[in-house]
Amino acid sequence: MTMAIGRRDVMLGAVGFGVTLAAGPHLLSAADSVAPRSFKTYRPVPGAGTDQTATLQAALDAAAGSGMPLFLPPDVYSTSRLELKSGTHLLGVAGRSILRYRDGGALLSVDRAQDIRIEGLVLDGGGRALGQDGALLGALEVERIEISNCRFVGSSADGVALERVSARIANCHFADIRRTALVSEESRTVEIAHNHIHACGNHGILVRGSEPGEVTIASNIVDKAATGIAVRRFNQGGGLAVVRGNCVRDLSFRKCVQSSGTGISIEARAWVSGNVVDNAPGFGILVGRGEATVTDNRIRNVYIGIGIPADRSGGTARVTGNAITGAKDGAIRALSGSAPADHDLAAYTNLVS
């Protein structure tokens, strides 16, 4: 059942929050101990049927202008693209406050804004066409955006697409995404942590670009994708990419996807540690250009455990303390292009069986 929004249904509530980015300032902070109050002036437009776009947009604009959070009670809200302004704090009840896509290339869009928080929503694309550059949530040039405890499902394109942002995405669930669950391009400080990503056509997580800044990708689960995690940036001396404590499993080949069949692909100044890669038809971990340390990872049931370029003029790779089992064509191989160029390089500092 699709909800018709009435005066008691869309509410502004102030709740005390003090969430920070990993290396950034505080996000929104609302006043404590203020009870939610009715948002009295909003009703469905007569004749609009189940389309709640205009009503929701008006509520979002008013909430951003007042500095108060906008709360969506549990139900299904049918909507086209909604634009979020600076200071928007949109929250719902996790798993029960559902935005269902109609058209417009996105459900939520943020453009040249700051201090955005989205929490406890389901963004359901329903498999409808989002367009070539579409995503369930898109953000461009946003300073401080936090997305937490949300679900992104049924996207015909990407799940979340970020460009030139500072962001934290945590404790979210992604499922049935045709392309990439979470893509970040040319962004600054980005933290991607404690997310569960299932059934993606391309990448689970993709971070790329040349902007200086730091990226942390930690404690995520990615299963059933073409490439689990890929970081392609910072190879000109930018910030550090930390990829740690992730679990990547059950990957597949797709000809149209770079590094297809690979658990973790790194072309960056990076620290890759404590990850588990299981059942990858390509590489467990693939290292390209950039200064990379690959240590204490567990890799199982792959074609090649760890691949590093034979020509390291683009940077050095330190590979130590990794446990690799069931690698069909070598635990650690030097590569000329994408092909193995030498015998297995596994040394005593790595455990191979």
Image: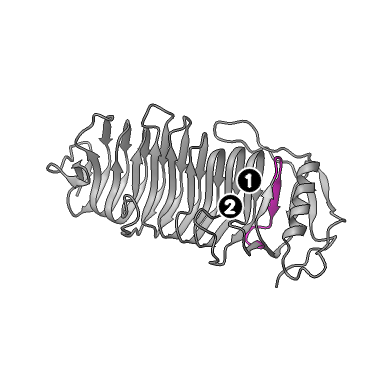
**Residue placed at 26% from the left, 45% from the top?**
323
Disc on res. 137? 2
Residue 76 quadrant: bottom right
- 89 inside magenta stretch: yes
**Which residue occupies the extreme bottom position in the image?**
1
- 254 inside magenta stretch: no
Find residue 69 and report its horizontal and vertical position in percent. Answer: 75, 47
Label 1, label 2: how far apart the Cα atoms are: 8 Å
Find residue 1 and report its horizontal and vertical position in percent. Answer: 70, 73
Q: Check contact, mark 1 vs mark 2: CB within 8 A.
A: yes
Q: Which is more toward the observer, 252 or 33? A: 252
Q: Which is more toward the observer, 56 or 68? A: 56
Q: Which residue is mark 1?
A: 110
Q: Which is more toward the observer, 76 or 119? A: 76
**Which residue occupies the extreme top position in the image?**
237
- Residue type, mark 1 in image: Val
**Which residue occupies the extreme left position in the image?**
343
Residue 237 falls left or right of residue 196? left
**Residue placed at 60% from the left, 48% from the top?**
148
Q: Which residues are magenta?
A: 85-98
